[in-house]
Image (tube, grey):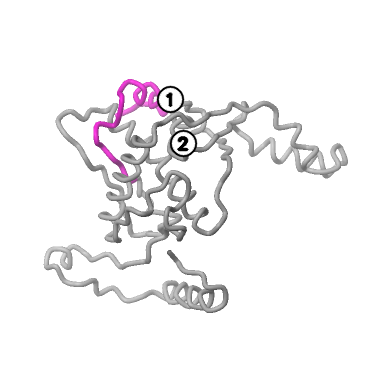
Amino acid sequence: IIQDAAETEALARSVESSGGVTIVPALSGLGAPYWRADARGVIAGLTHGAGRAEIVRAALESIAHQLHDLKSAFAGDGCDWNQLRIDGGMSANDWIAQDIADILDLGVKRPHDIETTGRGAAMLAAVGIGRFASLTEASAMCGHVDPFNPGMGAEIRRVRLEGWRHLVACHTRTPFRRDLIAVNGLASGRRSSPRNFAVPNKREALLGTKPSRKPTVGGKCRQLIIIALNRTVGWRPF
């Protein structure tokens, strides 16, 4: 589809939307807030009208969708985000940075020098040798940032997030909850992490039988931790 990652920005801008194509990029499972190592990647909504530009745009859109899930989980735990700073090679794509700001309805900042790992090490070294008294003073080394402010309409955001959550719910066999579709955090005020359901194998899926997978040791440990947290501070997984 592409020869180089740098092509993706132009392809994403060449179409008005993904044409109904949605991608769940679970190539190594789904991480936070789903924690589904057994999940696999999915491309849905393909039609004769979907070309490489729509598929590429859908892949880029999935980045903001996943970040929105994380933001919702944080908000559900009473720790919503008020801004987001991004760095790394992928952040060089202006379209991705703007789409993140639009979907999260949140201001995004990107440093001019996107490879900040080396700069962070230099800041620590500068504090260590006494060049700066603290990391707060050393932050002057960060330089200028490029701001990206949200500009997407609420209805467009809602439709995209609803399509994403519906696909994730179907793919992971977890209940689709419309109340989790919110612009700023969770409408219900509860954590968005689904419970860890076992996924049927091919035979079980064809026969319609229930999953026979037994809980793993790790799964039992997680259950014990959740029970302990629930009894002590009233925390629930979602």
CA gap between label 1 and label 2 equals 18 Å
Residue 114 position in % (x across, y down): 59, 31
- Residue type at mark 1: give it: Ala
Query: Which residue is depicted at the point 47% across and 28% down?
Result: 93
The answer to which quarter of the image holds residue 203 is bottom left
Quarter occupied by the C terminus: bottom left
Amino acid type, callout 2: Ile
Q: Is residue 18 magenta?
A: yes
Residue at horizontal 29%, vertical 44%?
A: 163
Please determine whether, in this image, residue 105 is positioned above or below residue 66: above
Report which residue position mark 2 lands on. 100
Question: Which residue, given by chain and number where applicable, does mark 1 sit on?
Answer: 6
Q: Position of residue 175 (x, y in %)?
A: 29, 60
Q: Residues within 10 Å of mark 1 (few under 14, many from 20)?
A: few
Magenta-colored span: 1-24
Which is nearer the N-term, disc 1 or disc 2? 1
